[in-house]
Image (tube, grey):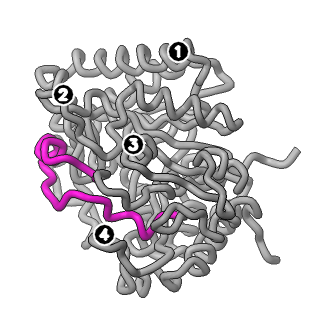
């Protein structure tokens, strides 16, 4: 039997896009997004989960406002089309990444054993809801891009300096205590997952960013391994215009899969289908970033990158390369959708311009038509000898 290779998509934003009028087309016919993705070969849907993504007036933080009810709705749609489900616990009320890992508002007074117990109980209660709804996740992320820890300040660790490609200098005792606290928080989430879900589900993923930085992964996972943290899969973010070359990624995946005896999975990636921006919009991806990324800013370039990325993951020895997940391929530039409201920005202490800066990295054009590059998922990874 051929080994399962994940061809995934994170579409956590989709309810917001549809609420503001986003519509999707395949060969000129309007269709449900999940149907299109299934037809094109996507086999897994990744969904983020925030604890309470609303301000004091119950106004949404946007970015998908991915509360429990929203995640349940999207997971049901995924299961309707026979897709596997990956649940991404952020353990925050909004975006969690190396720059910010804010504790949920309701958890602000908790620390130490109380905070670990809260992680355990929240994880258990959430997973019980999914079980009751018959939408058990096959994969569970305990934290999102926890390169610098999670649930700050308690779970904050030694900071990785991306531009310098090294960890910051830190007092050895402070470093030890930081990783001790982080390990305790992760263990609480993992233990809850193991106890709540059947053995056939809930494979546990620990996820860092900068997939081409081997020193980061060795340094971080050495600390976690020394503390006997239980997990199944090393998750990597890999954006070729930020995170090194495909050769950097290949070398890192081969090393860490062997060093820690774990499977590896690219849980976030993307590439632009154009360097242009939608009318009145803005964009992160540009022709200049395409120069760094190494592929033309076109539908063909997007497809070529994904073919090469899947082949790179597939080549990891002993079948340790599990697959890839494309990040927000359906984030259309409809008026009203935004990565954050001002209240959301304030919560995360991450101020910026509102709007969708991702639409030229989607796999649908600005009008919602499926791009030819989606066909690479149907073909799957191919390796030329």
Looking at the rendered image, the disc whose residue lies closer to the viewer, 3 or 4, is: 3
Q: Which residue corresponds to the image point at 48% horizontal and 82% vertical from the top-left?
A: 297
Q: Which residue is mark 2?
A: 58
Nearer to the camera, 332 or 348: 332
Residue at mark 3 to residue at mark 4: CA–CA distance = 41 Å
User: In the image, which residues are magenta?
Assistant: 338-362
- Neighbor class of circle 4 (other Cα within 10 Å; few <14, some 14-19, many 20+) is few
- Neighbor class of circle 3 (other Cα within 10 Å; few <14, some 14-19, many 20+) is few
Image location (x, y in percent) of residue 115: 24, 21
If you read the primary sequence from the N terminus, does the residue marked by circle 2 or circle 4 appear first? 2
Label 1 SS: helix
Q: Which residue is mark 1?
A: 195
Looking at the rendered image, the disc whose residue lies closer to the viewer, 2 or 4, is: 2
Residue at mark 2 to residue at mark 1: CA–CA distance = 33 Å
Left or right placement of residue 204 versus residue 354 in this view: right
Image location (x, y in percent) of residue 160: 27, 58
If you read the primary sequence from the N terminus, does the residue marked by circle 2 or circle 1 appear first? 2
Q: Which residue corresponds to the image point at 59% horizontal and 53% vertical from the top-left?
A: 257
If you read the primary sequence from the N terminus, does the residue marked by circle 3 or circle 4 appear first? 3
Instruction: Name which quarter of the figure residue 255 lies in.
Output: bottom right
Q: Which residue corresponds to the image point at 62% horizontal and 77% vertical from the top-left?
A: 304
Q: Which residue is mark 3?
A: 19
Q: Which residue is mark 4?
A: 165
If you read the primary sequence from the N terminus, does the residue marked by circle 4 or circle 1 appear first? 4
Quadrant where the N terminus sits is: top right
């Amino acid at each position: 039997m051929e080994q399962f290779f994940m061809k995934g998509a994170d579409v956590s934003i989709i309810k917001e896009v549809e609420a503001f009028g986003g519509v999707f087309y395949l060969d000129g016919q309007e269709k449900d997004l999940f149907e299109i993705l299934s037809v094109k070969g996507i086999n897994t849907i990744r969904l983020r989960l925030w604890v309470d993504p609303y301000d004091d007036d119950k106004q949404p933080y946007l970015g998908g406002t991915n509360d429990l009810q929203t995640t349940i709705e999207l997971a049901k749609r995924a299961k309707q089309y026979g897709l596997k489900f990956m649940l991404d616990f952020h353990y925050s009320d909004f975006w969690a990444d190396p720059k910010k890992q804010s504790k949920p508002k309701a958890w602000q007074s908790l620390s130490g054993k109380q905070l670990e117990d809260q992680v355990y109980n929240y994880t258990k209660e959430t997973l019980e809801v999914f079980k009751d709804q018959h939408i058990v996740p096959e994969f569970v992320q305990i934290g999102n891009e926890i390169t610098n820890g999670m649930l700050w300040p308690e779970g904050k660790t030694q900071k990785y300096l991306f531009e310098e490609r090294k960890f910051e200098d830190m007092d050895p005792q402070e470093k030890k205590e930081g990783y001790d606290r982080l390990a305790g928080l992760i263990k609480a989430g993992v233990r809850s997952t193991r106890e709540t879900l059947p053995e056939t589900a809930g494979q546990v993923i620990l996820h860092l960013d900068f997939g081409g930085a081997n020193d980061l992964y060795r340094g971080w996972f050495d600390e976690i391994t020394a503390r006997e943290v239980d997990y199944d899969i090393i998750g990597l973010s890999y954006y070729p215009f930020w995170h090194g070359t495909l050769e950097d990624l290949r070398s890192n995946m081969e090393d860490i899969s062997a060093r820690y005896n774990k499977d590896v999975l690219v849980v976030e990636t993307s590439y632009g289908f154009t360097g242009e921006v939608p009318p009145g919009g803005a964009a992160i991806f540009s022709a200049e970033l395409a120069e760094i990324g190494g592929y033309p800013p076109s539908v063909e370039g997007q497809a070529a990158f994904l073919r090469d990325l899947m082949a790179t993951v597939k080549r990891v020895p002993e079948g340790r390369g599990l697959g890839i997940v494309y990040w927000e391929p359906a984030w259309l530039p409809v008026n009203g959708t935004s990565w954050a409201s001002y209240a959301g920005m304030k919560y995360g202490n991450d101020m910026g311009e509102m709007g969708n800066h991702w639409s030229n990295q989607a796999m649908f054009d600005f009008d919602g038509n499926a791009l030819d590059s989606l066909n690479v998922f149907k073909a799957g990874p191919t390796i030329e000898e």
